[in-house]
Image (tube, helix red, strand yellow):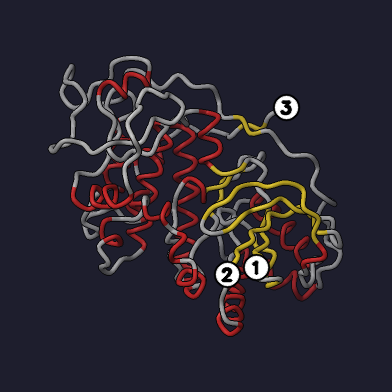
Amino acid sequence: MLARRKPVLPALTINPAIAEGPSPTSEGASEANLVDLQKKLAELELDEQQKKRLEAFLTQKAKVGELKDDDFERISELGAGNGGVVTKVQHRPSGLIMARKLIHLEIKPAIRNQIIRELQVLHECNSPYIVGFYGAFYSDGEISICMEHMDGGSLDQVLKEAKRIPEEILGKVSIAVLRGLAYLREKHQIMHRDVKPSNILVNSRGEIKLCDFGVSGQLIDSMANSFVGTRSYMSPERLQGTHYSVQSDIWSMGLSLVELSIGRYPIPPPDAKELEAIFGRPVVDGVEGEPHSISPRPRPPGRPISGHGTDSRPAMAIFELLDYIVNEPPPKLPSGVFTQDFQEFVNKCLIKNPAERADLKMLMGPWLGGLPHVEVKAGP
C-alpha cells in the first residue's frame, strides 16, 4: 500500500563549486593508454555520459605525474573522520582541484610502505559510482590520499542542511551505492567495510559516489582505534567478531537509509512523540491508528534528534549502542510516511541474520525499478 502522504521537503539542491582547474583534453595521454582505457570502460556497461566523464577524469589524471607535498596549495578544510582530515587543495603543476586526506600514523617504515603499496589498487578502481583516485604518498609523518573533489560534500553534510532527504532521492542514492558495491565486489573482490552517510559523496552534476573503502588491510589495522563512529554502522555479525561478507555492507546501507530518511541516527528508534516532532504530525506504524511501536525493553538514553532538538537525554554510550545493535530488533521506517516498497527494501537490508538478509542482486527490485527518474539538481 502506498503512503497517503509523502514528506514535504524541498528538492535537494547542491550548489556547484567555482571552476576547478583546466578543462579535460586528450593531450598528455598516450594512444596506447587510451586504447587500454577504452577497453576497460567497454566492460563496465556505461552510458555515453558516464563513459565520457570517466575518460575525461582519467585523461586529466594522466597529466598529474608523481605527487609531492610541495605541489599542493591548501584551499579549505572539507571534514574530518576515521583518523584523518580532508582538505580541498589545488595541485599546482596540473591546476586540478583535489580532495586530500591526511592520516597521521606513527608506524615503522616497512608498514608505511606496505600501506602505500596496498593503496595503489585504487588506481584500478574506475567506476561512475566510486570516487576517483589520483594517488597516495607519505610525507612528514602523514599518509596523503588524493581523490576527486566532490563539490556537493558527503550525505551527512547534506543532511545537516536538508534535515531529511526525500525518498525519491534516496532511491538514486541506493542505486549508486548498490552499483558501487557490486563493482568493487565483481571487479576487484573488495568489500567496502565502511558504508555510512559520510562516505557517500555527491557533486553538482548529480553524481553519487562511494569513498573510503577498505583496500588496505594494513591501514585498517593501523587505524583500528579511530573507528568508533564506524562501529555504529557495523552489522551485528561484524560486531560479534564472526565471519562477515558483503552482506555486512548491505546492513550499513540500510541503516544509513533510515538515518537519511528520518534525519537522525536511528538507534534507539524514535518513539511516537519524537516521530511527530520529525514529521510534523502524528505518525502511525502497523495497524491504522496504532501508535509507533516501542522496543520490547526500556530504551537506553538516545541521541538528540538532529535538527529537531526535542530530545534532551544524554547520548547513548558506545558499549550500550553496540549491545543494542546486536541484541535488539533492527530499526525500521515508520508507516504512513514512506511507500511500502521503500519500507520493505530497508527491512530486507536490516535482517539481523546475514544468511537471510538481501543480497546485491535481490535489492535491485520493485522499489528501485518503480521510482521516477529524479535528478539531484544543481544550484544556479
Q: Residue at x 61, y 82 (%)?
A: 109
Taking 81 as reference, is 260 above or below it?
A: above
Q: Tell me: 28 left or right of 55.
A: right
Give the Cα distance between marks 1 and 2.
6 Å
Residue that label 2 marks: 105
Taking 11 as reference, is 50 above or below it?
A: below
Q: Amino acid at mark 3?
A: Pro
Residue that label 3 marks: 380
Q: Are marks 1 and 2 in contact (CB under 8 Å)?
A: yes
Q: Residues within 10 Å of mark 3 (few under 14, many from 20)?
A: few
Residue that label 1 marks: 142
Q: Residue at x 67, y 43 (%)?
A: 151
Q: Amino acid at mark 1?
A: Glu
Q: Secondary structure at mark 1?
A: strand
Say whether disc 1 or disc 3 marks the residue closer to the N-terminus. Answer: 1
Q: Residue at x 63, y 40 (%)?
A: 152
- Front label number (1 vs 3): 1
Q: Residue at x 44, y 53 (%)?
A: 195
Q: Position of residue 138 (x, y in %)?
A: 68, 72
- Front label number (3 vs 2): 2
Q: Position of residue 81 (x, y in %)?
A: 53, 53
Q: Residues within 10 Å of mark 2 (few under 14, many from 20)?
A: some
Q: Secondary structure at mark 2?
A: loop
